[in-house]
Image: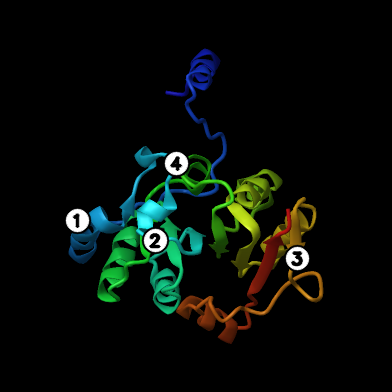
Amino acid sequence: MPQTMTEQQADTQQGVYIRKIRSFVKREGRLTQGQARAIDKNWPAMGLTMEQGLLNLTEVFGRTAPVVLEIGFGMGKSLVEMAAAERDKDFIGIEVHRPGVGACLMDAEASELTNLRVIEADAVEVLEKCIPDNSLARLQLYFPDPWHKKRHHKRRIVQPDFAQLVRRKLHTGGLWHLATDWQNYAEHMLKVMSAAPGFRNLSASGDYVPRPEFRPQTKFEQRGQRLGHGVWDLMFERES
């Protein structure tokens, strides 16, 4: 049953975070036995929770290193590949779908990663409540739900307020890397970010950048390109 306005006001006064619009729909698939085993085995070492509150990232990883955070890692193959290729950096992946979390932990275990942590939660809440300001070297948002129908555009995660949340979490000189295979969403991202205070577009032409070497090309992306589908990468640096 929906909360009444009085109940919502009470929750707000008690400090309860209320999200009116979410940028995702949670489609909970069935865990495979391997995914369930990977979660049970690896969660104590690699799992993070909202209940931990604001994280001390040096304590989380047991060292001081640049931290890369990815929002919505899907099944985690690209995230694991990046963490394996850049072992001098520490990675945090956020995903709301448990089978993806399990698959990511399976691959991370197989790659013997020690520089990856995952959290199963809403990315906006994680950023607000768990990630310290000025702590991230790079934030990655790859192929988010485009909400392609115009009436759903308000659900897109890339909005002016979210851009400023990201800005707070990046340290000065930190990078926000976005990628999408929907041209309309790419144009929306570019419009939002071009107007966002404190960011500089790293594109030489003022719009998009070539896919950087550190972002793996997925099988889905390769198939789409063979069919003539475009992919747009955007890279913005926090200036202030």
List x then y, in percent, for residue 167. Answer: 65, 51
Whether residue 66 is visible here, answered yes or no, is yes
Q: What is the number of the mark on residue 54?
A: 4
Q: What is the number of the mark on residue 201?
A: 3
Above or below for 15 versus 157: above
Query: For this view, does 5 lie left or right of residue 56?
Result: right
Q: Look at label 4 and name its amino acid.
A: Leu
Look at the image and tell me in which quarter the N terminus lies.
top left
Query: For this view, does 102 lie left or right of residue 5?
Result: left
Q: Look at label 2 and name its amino acid.
A: Arg
CA gap between label 1 and label 3 equals: 42 Å
Q: Secondary structure at mark 1?
A: helix
List x then y, in percent, for residue 144. Answer: 55, 59
> Which is more foreground, mark 4 or mark 1?
4
Q: Which residue is mark 1?
A: 40
CA gap between label 4 and label 3 equals: 29 Å
Q: Which residue is mark 2?
A: 63
- The mark nearer the N terminus, 2 or 1, is 1
CA gap between label 2 and label 1 equals: 25 Å
